[in-house]
Amino acid sequence: MKSKFLALLFLIPNFVLAAPSSGGVDAGGGNSVDGRMIEDYLIDPEVKLPGYKQAIDLLAQRLNNMAPTMGDDMKAALKEKNWFLIPREIRELPSSVTGLHFATSQTAYQTEHEMFIDQDSLRGMKPEFRTTLYEHEGIMSLFKATPEQTRRMIIFIDRKSTRLNSSHTD
């Protein structure tokens, strides 16, 4: 018990020091949406996101076919994140981040340790577009890629997978 307490004492300062500060005496404040703290929107994506598990398992299989363990590494990177399903529109990221120079809807965004998804935007997506969203977030998590790099990788993986599948049917 004493060793767990000592370990916690060493971890807390590291979390606080690593958190970005915008002034004041601490690294942030308590944020809420509709009277619930952000932490209360934490979800298990395999349980709460329709089609998530199937999409990520398929992408992992395709990645493992290209490079052993790459898909498993992606799944591990996604499991390390805290996922939040938020009942709010996410502000559009600047074009300097997305690489897009036209208005878009920001359905999700992620940091090194967290993934935020706009609940309403997700509900409005057709299943095949949700799959692309999950693939996009998985690739970003694995490679720490920019949005543009992520789009290019997904297109490459889809094309390579299509070629591999068609070569097996000949």
Image: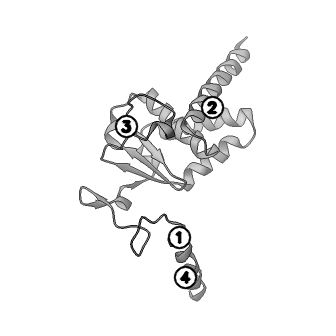
Q: Secondary structure at mark 2?
A: helix
Q: Earlier in the sequence, mark 3 or mark 4?
A: 4
| Residue 69: image location, x then y, percent | 72, 43
Specify the amino acid type for callout 1.
Answer: Phe
Residue 63 x, y percent position in the rendering: 67, 35
Q: CA distance from mark 2 to mark 1?
A: 32 Å
The residue nearer to you, when weighing 138 against 152, is: 152
Mark 3 residue type: Leu
Of mark 1 and mark 3, the one earlier in the sequence is 1
Disc 1, SS: helix
Give how far across and how far down residue 10 sits, in percent: 58, 80
Residue 11 lies, with reference to residue 89, above or below; the image says below
Left or right position of 59 against 43: right
Residues under numbered marks 1 and 3 in contact, where contact means CB atoms less than 8 Å apart: no
Q: Which residue is depicted at the point 68% across and 23% down?
A: 160
On the question of residue 58 being in view, the answer is no
- Choose top left, top right, bottom left or bottom right for residue 22: bottom left
Q: Earlier along the polypeptide chain: callout 3 or callout 2?
A: 3
Q: Check whether the beta carbons of the residues at disc 4 and disc 1 lie within 8 A of each other.
A: no
Res. 122 mark = 3
Mark 3 to mark 4: distance in Å?
39 Å
Q: Toward which corner of the image does residue 159 lie, by quadrant?
A: top right
**Disc 3 versus disc 2: nearer the observer:** 2
The numbered mark, 2 or 1, whose residue comes first in the sequence reads 1
Answer few, some or many: residues within 10 Å of disc 4's Cα (few below 14, many 20 plus, some between 14 and 19). Answer: few
Residue picked out by circle 4: 9
Q: Reading the chain from its start, which is encountered first: label 2 or label 4? A: 4
Task: Specify whether residue 99 is in view.
Answer: yes
Quickly name the residue at label 2: 153
